[in-house]
Structures are given as structure tokens and as C-alpha cells.
Amino acid sequence: MKHDRNTAPYRREVLPPPESLVTNGRFNLGTFNGPIANVNPLDARRPLGVPLPRALAGFRLKEWEALQLGNEQCFMLVVLYDLKLASLVQFIYYDRREGNKHLYETIVPSWRVRVPSSLRDTVARYRSRRFSIEIHNDLARGLVTVSVSASSFKRLPDVRGRFECLHAINIEPIVVCQPFAENRAMYSHKCLMPMRGALTLGGREIAFDPASSFAILDDHKGFYPYALRYDWVTGAGFDSRKRLVGFNLTDNQVRDPERYNENCLWISGRMHPLPPIRITRPDGDMGRWSVRDAFGMVDIGFTPVVDGVIDMNLGAVKIDYHGPFGEYDGCIVDANGKKVSVETFFGMGERKYLRA
């Protein structure tokens, strides 16, 4: 769909963040431009529609903290995902020049992974003798620090990395609280930031400069439906003016997606809300994906270069997941009606179905 208007036709209200995600038992729905200090979904009144003990409601709350990190040389994914039935821990390194992917992954009991309740001086963590991930959220200092290490792990190269993601005062996240049903909602804090750090992979050292490296944070909690479905793409890069540009685009199960969605474009730290989108894959999961909206603001393609697959069917629990990394083309229109090219940007997409 082509955009031929002088001004962007879509608008969505962006509010200052509330102090708490839930107040007097009710979710504070909306799109916000700053972190929520008290992320308290378990204080919601009957989020699953029936009265349940707090512990049982917590068992239905999906929680994760993840980051995408990269530059022109590589793209990385760090994930701590608490499904409550089990937890997924991942570090993925993909070399964009050589086409090599290293997947460090384990599935462990839920109690082995810590996903914190907020981003205010908290730590997300998994530790074992051979594989560890730690994410220190310190937004008061404008930092999210990521540490990763693995040694003698599944015949993969030893890896050790430390990255500082610069969530400074001039960096605007997109923070949302969106409804699935009456007082049943999800929360997400996503942010594109410059990143600095270093990685040692099998004896090879790689440095990351904030002038050419990025990180995208995804802090997430939700009372998702039993059968969860969504499509998602995210990517980033530096444009011809050396501005850090990126986007987050999701098509999920929220009510009234024109009013409630987590779609946005970031340009040099500023967040521009975007309309609902649809993702089509006429040639399958590893063919080119088309991402468009109904307002003529998003018209991009995603070409996967390497897939990530989880295929599990245990009866009550089923996962049908594709999460490829790949390259973007096309353009997105910002809040001022100007086209922004995403040619040569890199990132990932997801097609997820989860029954749990």
C-alpha cells in the first residue's frame, strides 16, 4: 500500500505513565512514553474472569525480558521467558557476514529463572555452571546492562559478553497496557537504544560502539488467552544521516487495535506511534513477509535468512513457533508524514501459536 499524502493520517494518544500498572484493581489501559514504576498485574481484580487465588492467577501470567542487540557485523538475541510450566533461556549469535548462527538454549523449571516485577533497579537472571544470563535494569541511571557467559556448553564455542544499553533521558520507549477482555490485559515496555560493549566468542573478540550498535529491550507480562497467537517484526539500523532508526510492529489478540497496539517507529530516540498492521507470508515462513497497514504508513518487507523453530505438541501444551532473523526493505511514514527508509535494516520476526 503506497502513501501519497503530505501528513500522516493516523494518530494515537500517548500519555505520561501512571505510577502503577493496576490501580484499585483495574488495569490502566493506554500507550505511555515512559516506564511504569510499579508493574503490578497480580493486583488486578479477576483478570481471568473468575475469582482465583493470587498464586493461581500468577500461574497464568506469561512473563519475559528479552533484548535484540546488533550492528553491521552481527545480530544477537537474549531471552529469559517464564511460561510458568517451564522457562526458556536463550542466547543467539548470528554473524551477518559469514551467515553462522550459534544457539545457546536450555529449558528449565520455572523457579530457575528470575523475571523481575519492574525495571526499577532490578535483575533478571538465570545461572548454571555452564550457562548464565543476567540483565540489570537500572533506568534511574539510564542503563540496562546485559551479561552472558557459556563454557563447555553443548559443543558450542565458549562465549562471554557484557553490553550496556543506553536508556538515557532522551530515549523514549513505547510502554503499553492493552486489553484482551474485561480487566484482562498485557503490559509491554519496548525501547530502541544505542549499545556499547564487548563479546568474546571462541577466542574471537568483537567490540560494540554506540555510534554503530543498537539494542531493543522487550519487558513483557500478560494474561494471554489460553491459545495465544501473534505476528511480530522488529528491526533497526542507521540511516543515511547516521540516525538510529528502528521499529516494533505486532498483530496480536488485543481488543480495538486501532486504539490499543504496540506499533511504533523510533528515530534518534523519539517514538512515533503507528497503526495496526497485518503480516502476510504468501511463500511461507522462510519466504518474504509483507507488513502493511490500512493507513498507508507501513509498507515493508522482511526476508528471512536463518530460521528459529520450536515445534512441540504435548496435548495440553502446544508450541508452533517460527522466529527467523532477516533483512528489511521498504519504508515507514513518521508522525510528520515523512517517509523513512528501512533498507538494509536487520532484525527478526515471529509467528507464534502457544497453547498453555
Image (cartoon, grey):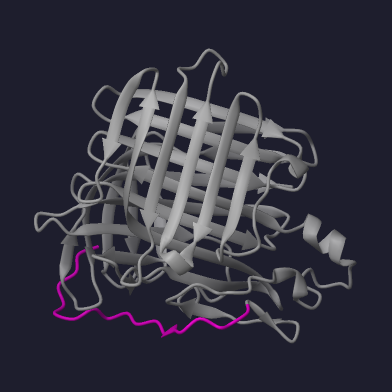
22 sits left or right of 202 in the view: right
User: Residue 177: where, in percent of width, then height?
Assistant: 57, 73
Q: Residue furthest front?
A: 141
Residue pictured at 16% horizontal, 77% vertical: 5
Q: In which image quadrant can residue 27 be found?
A: bottom right
User: Residue 166: where, in percent of width, then height?
Assistant: 35, 58
User: Residue 150: where, in percent of width, then height?
Assistant: 53, 25
Q: Residue furthest left?
A: 240
Q: Is residue 236 above or below residue 23?
A: above
Q: How many discs appear?
A: 0
Q: Residue furthest top?
A: 155
User: Residue 208: where, in percent of width, then height?
Assistant: 28, 40
21 sits left or right of 10 in the view: right
Is residue 306 visible to the viewer in this orientation of the structure? no
Report the span colored magenta: 1-20
Q: Is residue 6 above or below residue 89?
A: below
Is residue 50 visible to the viewer in this orientation of the structure? yes
Q: Does 293 lie within the magenta span?
A: no
Q: In which image quadrant can residue 183 be found?
A: bottom right
Residue pictured at 18% horizontal, 62% vertical: 340
Q: Does 3 lie within the magenta span?
A: yes
Q: In which image quadrant can residue 144 be found?
A: bottom left
Residue pictured at 57% horizontal, 19% vertical: 153
Q: Is residue 261 above or below residue 226?
A: below
> 286 or 167: nearer the eye?
167
Residue pictured at 46% horizontal, 50% vertical: 145
> 30 or 218: nearer the eye?
218
> 244 or 329: nearer the eye?
244
**Quadrant into which the N terminus falls:** bottom left
- Magenta part, dominant SS: loop
